[in-house]
Amino acid sequence: MAWLPEYCLSRIEARGRRPGLALQSPAMSVHTSYVPDRPAVRWGILGVARIATEKVIPAMQRGTYCEVAAIASRDLSKAEAAAARLGIAKAYGSYEALLADADVDAVYNPLPNHLHVPWSVRAAEAGKHVLCEKPIGLDAAEAEQLLAARDRTGVTIEEAFMVHTHPQWIGAIDLVRGGRIGPVRAVVGAFSFFNDDPKNIRNAPEFGGGALMDIGCYLVHASRWIVGREPDRVMALIDRDPRFGIDRRTSMMLDFGDDAHAIGTCSMQHVPYQRVQILGTTGRVEIEIPFNAPADRPCRVFIGDGSDPTGVRAETIEFEACNQYTIEADRFSCAVLHGTAAPLPLEDSVKNMRVIDALVRSAKSGEWEHP
């Protein structure tokens, strides 16, 4: 059963309640009587990636059930500098040393994509729970190694799709499940930014770079979540950068059958932009900032009921500012402390990778492919 910290639920209730928005859905249930045996999960961080040092670690440190106890880098000086700046007690000059620390309960893995599975498996074998950045692996076959590691070791492993914890997404999914817009017929998404830096690891194909793996995975995940089932077939067009060899733009179509389709474009060489539209038979839901939701200001979801033929007029639901990385880490930590399943099942992440694999095959074959 999914779990949200009470402080998060109260924020949703305070700012998100509108007619037709059912807040007490199963996706938002709360264990109000739960008191953890230990006040916090002690986290170790593998690497000093920017996503970790600038976003995730500070967010974890604001969490109710998180303690960032250690950080590691293959360069000890980098680990020590990050530890000093972020107030982390321990710094290690190798990932192995951090995994050997008995005072670390769980690790956050923000390493480059090609290192997600190898180091997550090693962490699991060291008895550490693992929150691993997306994409969970380079392909579905690799991701399935994590299923085996989880089942073999008994630890909790989850892909860090932080959007899965944000109140605006929970509210939007609630609107869809509640029938507010009628049956879903289409999901339209876009996610882009501009990065042509040859030194950036996202532009290195050997390390799992490219737009589809970096940000297209969000569009795939969101579409599957919104529609509520797996696509029957998918198709993709990929534009590769002649310098780097990575996909700088991928456009995709997912056919869910029963008249439900999803289309999306992701790019690492477009103007920065993101938006998700959910179109039903009687209305639409638009998520204004679906993926990089700001932590310092409210997020907005728009609902159109079809009364305006231009589609411009819409009701606005505003969700109070919150940090989706804090909620993500707290939810994971509570699953660890309470001995419950990961909030986002690892099986779902493997299914997401199967769709991504099929999109890559489609771009090569020029045909519909089955995940």
Image (cartoon, rainbow, N blue to C red):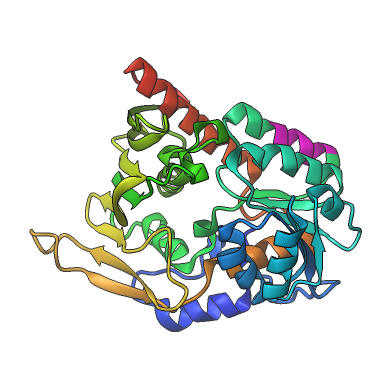
Residue 197 visible here: yes
- Residue at 14 percent across and 60 percent down: it is 311
**Residue 340 seen:** no
Residue projecting furthest to the front: 77
Is residue 62 found left or right of 256 in the rendered image? right
Q: In which quadrant of the rendered view does residue 40 lie?
A: bottom right
The residue nearer to you, when weighing 370 against 53, is 53
Report x, y in % for residue 290. 39, 59
Magenta run includes residue 144: no
Q: Measured from the top left, where is residue 145 in percent x and y?
A: 71, 32
The answer to which of 145 and 199 lies nearer the viewer is 199
Q: Residue 177 in the image: state x and y as whole percent.
A: 41, 55
For this view, does 302 lie left or right of residue 177? Answer: left
Magenta residues span: 145-152
The overriding secondary structure of the stretch rendered in magenta is helix
Residue 39 higher or lower than 252, as above or below: below
Q: Is residue 100 above or below residue 167?
A: above
Say which quadrant the N terminus sits in: bottom right
Q: Residue at x 53, y 67 (%)?
A: 324
Asked if residue 321 is positioned above or below residue 183 in the image, the reply reads below
Q: Is residue 285 left or right of residue 48?
A: left
Quarter where residue 143 is shown: top right
Q: Position of residue 117 (x, y in %)?
A: 68, 38
Task: Tell how many labels.
Answer: 0
Q: Residue furthest bottom?
A: 14
Residue at point 64% right, 77% down? 62
Q: Quadrant of residue 269?
A: top left
